[in-house]
Image (tube, rainbow, N blue to C red):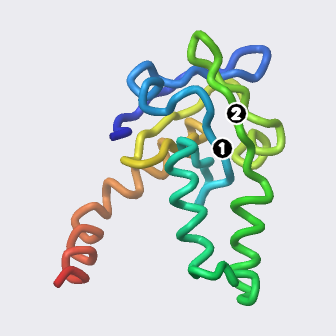
Amino acid sequence: MLIGEYIHTIDDKNRVSMPAKFRKELGKKIIITPGLGACLFIFTAKEWEKVSKKLSDSDSDLSFLKADQRNFNRYMFGRAAEVEIDSIGRILIPDFLKARIGLSSSAAIVGVRDRVEVWNDKVWAENKAVVEKQAEQLAEALGNGQK
């Protein structure tokens, strides 16, 4: 399980280190894609396969017949990139994804169970402060949805 929050610097070659606790679980190749909100999502190849199947939403894979699904799939798949973790645990975030979330000198790397999120560290701090104030209400709303 991927959990925890880490702040890592981005080196002069635009590489960022994955936390040591994540490296074994992530494997050598990962998929990085635009996330929801102001972050990027990182999936293992195995988890990306699961996400791909869920996004197809059909045994016959006719997801292309639904406009909303086509658009979301373009968003997730069209800007996804396969990236290798190097021998010392660094990844190169493609420039177009780096620009999308405004990464410059450091990033927040956050484990969210089945994926890793990469955030601009300042935006992450702001988001975290807002969510922390709403935690009880969010828990209540999620609890009310349970049967």
Query: Residue drawn 42% across and 48% down?
Result: 114
User: Residue extending furthest front?
Assistant: 60
Q: Is residue 80 left or right of residue 17?
A: right
The quarter of the displayed image where residue 64 is located: bottom right
Look at the numbered disc 1 and give the secondary structure of its residue.
strand
Q: Quadrant of residue 5?
A: top left
- Residue 40 lies, with reference to residue 93, above or below; the image says below
143 on left or right of 3: left
The residue nearer to you, when weighing 36 against 1, is 1
Question: Mark 1–mark 2 contact, CB under 8 Å?
Answer: yes
Q: Earlier in the sequence, mark 1 or mark 2?
A: 1
Where is mark 1, residue-wise?
A: 32
51 to 90, vertically: above or below: below
Percent x, y of residue 30: 61, 37
| Residue at x 16% of width, y 84% of height | 147
Label 2 Cα crowd, 10 Å radius (few <14 / some 14-19 / many 20+): some
Tag shown at residue 83: 2
SS of the residue under disc 2: strand
Q: Residues within 10 Å of mark 1 (few under 14, many from 20)?
A: many
Tell me residue 28's x, y (percent): 58, 26
Residue 68, above or below 134: below
> In the depicted view, which residue is nearer to us: 75 or 24?
24
Residue visible at 75% across and 89% down in the picture: 65
